[in-house]
Image (cartoon, helix red, strand yellow):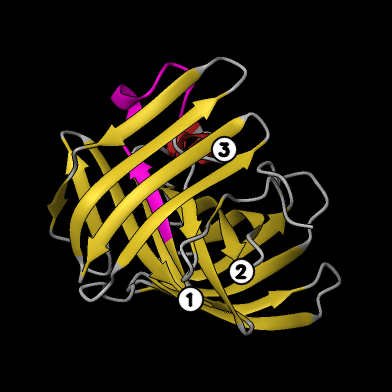
Amino acid sequence: MRALALLCLLPLAALAQTESREMGGHLGSRAALLVLHGSKTAEGAWQLAGEYIVLPTMQRRFLEGESSPEIGVTTLREGTTAIVFGRATTGELRGTLRDGVFKGARYAPGGQERERFEFSEEFPAMESYSANVRCEATGGQYGSTLSMRIDAGKLQSFEWHSTLAASGHACSVASLRQQPMKGGLRFASGKCSVTLREIGDYVRLASENCAEQCGSQAYLEPLFIDRRGNCQLLRGESR
């Protein structure tokens, strides 16, 4: 589920002030990535929608809830589909969200505490990251191929392609130049950029503003690259 779809879950009247957060951390003993999109209400609270992804299983849970003003008390209901409101939940995250850190506990639908969590907007530096990756990943009608070489945090070569079998539309991103980035690596060409962030034993590759490099029905799904250079896509839902 891309960010645009998640933002559509938020009330249109509250979109005057919006923000997105990408946070790395852990859920219990497992590394995880949290992505939240929020809109600020007239009362100062934040209405939130998003998802978290548990590594290395690539399982995901979708989230919906709110965060209070000032102290950031936050409650997020979780489910297996992007529409959480009005449907059976698989759990709930309760904690505080402030100063770029979200921490607390995950509870079962019956209210029992399952595990503690902590996420932060501070990601590890990647100045020493080196990789020579050639991989393919497929899911349903979607296919993606990546060729990337990085030496000590410096981009040497990059090509990322995707195709959607049903329409034949494709994306192609190449000839990128490196840009400064704290807590990761960023490469760009015009408006289109790709970022790498380290999360546990994985590196996540994601694109932004690359529509001009794609056919009208094509897109670039994020890839998770393990230490052996294998690439994985996300599952459609957690089980």
Residue 105 position, x and y percent, is: 64, 80
The secondary element bearing badge 2 is classed as loop
Confirm whether the magenta stretch covers residue 232.
no
Give the quadrant of the C terminus.
bottom right
Disc 1, SS: loop
Q: How many marks?
A: 3
User: Which residue is disc 2 drawn over?
Assistant: 56
Please tell me which of labels 2 and 1 falls first in the chain.
2
Look at mark 3 in the image and give the residue it sits on: 9
Q: Say which residue label 1 marks.
A: 200
Mark 2 closeness class: few <14, some 14–19, many ≥20 residues within 10 Å: some
Whichever of labels 1 and 3 marks the residue nearer the N terminus, that label is: 3
**Residue 110 at what x, y percent from top left?**
86, 71
Kindly state the secondary structure of the residue where label 3 is placed.
Answer: loop
Which span of residues is magenta-colored?
Answer: 204-219
Is residue 44 in sight in this rendering?
no
Q: Residue 57 at what x, y percent from top left?
A: 67, 65
Relative to residue 203, is residue 9 depicted above or below? Answer: above
